[in-house]
Image: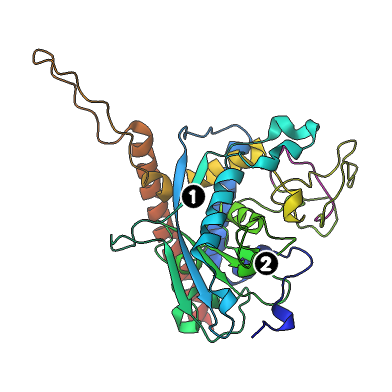
């Protein structure tokens, strides 16, 4: 059986992240407060008031939830297709992608190795060995940005703890939707990214022009607090992406533009349409910038600090075999990790405080009504 017309691969990239973001801003005072704190932290990094403490590569465990309708067997994508997506992520986030040499010369000095890698989880939340790939059948024909795919109660599947894993749901999305993410600061039970199965990885059901795995690169950029490069201001040239080294541009770019593409008086170089946070076809995006990498660091050292704390400390070298000079005991946790643990504890306390404040406001409103 073939999939219905509405579910076929769209002819242009469509990301639902900002719709999810605006919905949460309208519905949740807690989310608004958290987003304000997260953006203030990001601004301090952008202005140089804080500097990234992280120097090592971080590896983020990934839980892939394949939610498929048995009536359409192609939705149950292969392990190989999933592994191909992880490989793309590790190239793109480390600036090791083979097409990075296509970045125009004017921006080559801005290409960033974010020092972020991804690995399918090897242990489930109970400590049991796992492939990191879960498969769940559904009777839903397609999903949307309403997060139904993220809960078994709505014919999807529940996430693994979002402070320990990056949850990625792969499914059939309706209309022209390729994927969406939840910015940091949202509800933990819906945290993660959702990707259309035909825009996931580089083989199997992956279909051009979104068959190089860049939809997931784009959506994980959002998960790490990157905005669209044009600022989503409807062409007004008034709002950017809060990153200084990405040029202001009017709107999203689609297809495969040629350099330079000038908008918002941003000549002579024009729009940075080769950036992963634009909307071009997969063959046309090649880079994150240094400023975007710094913004991701601000996220990882604040709202997503649990992923840094979970990183194992480097093994200490063996002590010399000299009886007269016993080895000095190595600390179990180095200063940076201890600092991050302290920061994570502070964030948890702040979250509890904000929740108490919001509950008090709600109670007062209910009483007054």
Camera-side residue of 154 and 365:
154
Q: Residue at x 80, y 56 (%)?
A: 252
Q: Quadrant of the C terminus?
A: bottom right
**Rendered view: 288 above or below 191:** above
Q: Residues within 10 Å of mark 1 (few under 14, many from 20)?
A: some
x, y percent for residue 200: 61, 62
* Quarter occupied by residue 182: bottom right
Q: Quadrant of residue 270?
A: top right
Residue at numbered disc 2: 178
| Residue at left offset 74%, top offset 63% | 13
Is 78 displayed left or right of 242 in the figure?
A: left
The magenta region covers 242-252
**Inter-mark Cα distance, 2 to 1:** 21 Å
In the figure, is residue 241 to the left or right of 339?
A: right
| Count of numbered tags | 2
Q: Position of residue 262 (x, y in %)?
A: 90, 44
For image coordinates 61% across by 61% down, the residue present is 203
Sequence-earlier tag: 2 or 1 = 1
Say which residue label 1 marks: 118
Which quarter of the image is occupied by the N terminus?
bottom right
Q: Residues within 10 Å of mark 2 (few under 14, many from 20)?
A: many
In this view of the protein, which residue sits in the foreground, 179 or 96?
96
Secondary structure type for disc 1? strand
- Residue 305 makes an appearance in the image: no
Let me know if residue 286 appears in the view: yes
Q: Secondary structure at mark 2?
A: loop
Q: Nearer the viewer, residue 360 or 283?
A: 283
Q: Please name the colour scheme applied to the rendered image.
A: rainbow
Q: Main secondary structure of the magenta part?
A: loop
């Amino acid at each position: 059986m073939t999939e219905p017309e509405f579910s076929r691969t769209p002819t242009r990239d469509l990301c639902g992240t900002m719709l999810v973001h605006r919905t949460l801003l309208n519905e949740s005072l807690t989310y608004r407060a958290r987003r304000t704190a997260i953006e203030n932290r990001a601004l301090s990094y952008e202005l140089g008031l804080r500097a990234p403490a992280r120097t090592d590569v971080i590896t983020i465990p990934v839980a892939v939830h394949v939610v498929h309708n048995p009536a359409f067997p192609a939705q149950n994508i292969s392990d190989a297709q999933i592994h191909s997506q992880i490989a793309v992520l590790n190239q793109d986030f480390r600036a090791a992608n083979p097409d990075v040499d296509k970045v125009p010369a004017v921006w080559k000095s801005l290409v960033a190795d974010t020092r972020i890698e991804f690995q399918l989880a090897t242990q489930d939340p109970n400590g049991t060995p796992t492939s990191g790939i879960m498969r769940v059948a559904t009777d839903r024909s397609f999903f949307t940005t309403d997060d139904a795919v993220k809960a078994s109660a709505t014919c999807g599947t529940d996430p693994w703890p979002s402070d320990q894993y990056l949850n990625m749901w792969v499914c059939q999305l309706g209309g022209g939707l390729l994927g969406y993410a939840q910015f940091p600061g949202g509800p933990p039970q819906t945290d993660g990214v959702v990707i259309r199965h035909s825009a996931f990885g580089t083989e199997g059901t992956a279909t051009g022009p979104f068959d190089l795995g860049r939809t997931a690169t784009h959506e994980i950029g959002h998960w790490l607090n990157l905005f669209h490069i044009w600022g989503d201001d409807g062409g007004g040239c008034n709002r950017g992406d809060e990153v200084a080294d990405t040029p202001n541009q009017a709107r999203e770019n689609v297809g495969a533009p040629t350099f330079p593409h000038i908008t918002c008086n941003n000549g002579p170089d024009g729009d940075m349409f080769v950036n992963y946070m634009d909307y071009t076809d997969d063959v046309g995006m090649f880079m994150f910038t240094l400023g975007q990498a710094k913004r991701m660091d601000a996220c990882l050292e604040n709202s997503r600090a649990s992923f840094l704390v979970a990183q194992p400390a480097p093994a200490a070298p063996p002590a010399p075999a000299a009886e007269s000079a016993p080895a000095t005991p190595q600390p179990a946790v180095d200063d940076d990790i201890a600092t991050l643990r302290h920061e994570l504890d502070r964030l948890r306390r702040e979250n509890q405080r904000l929740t108490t404040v919001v509950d008090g406001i709600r109670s007062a409103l209910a009483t007054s009504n």
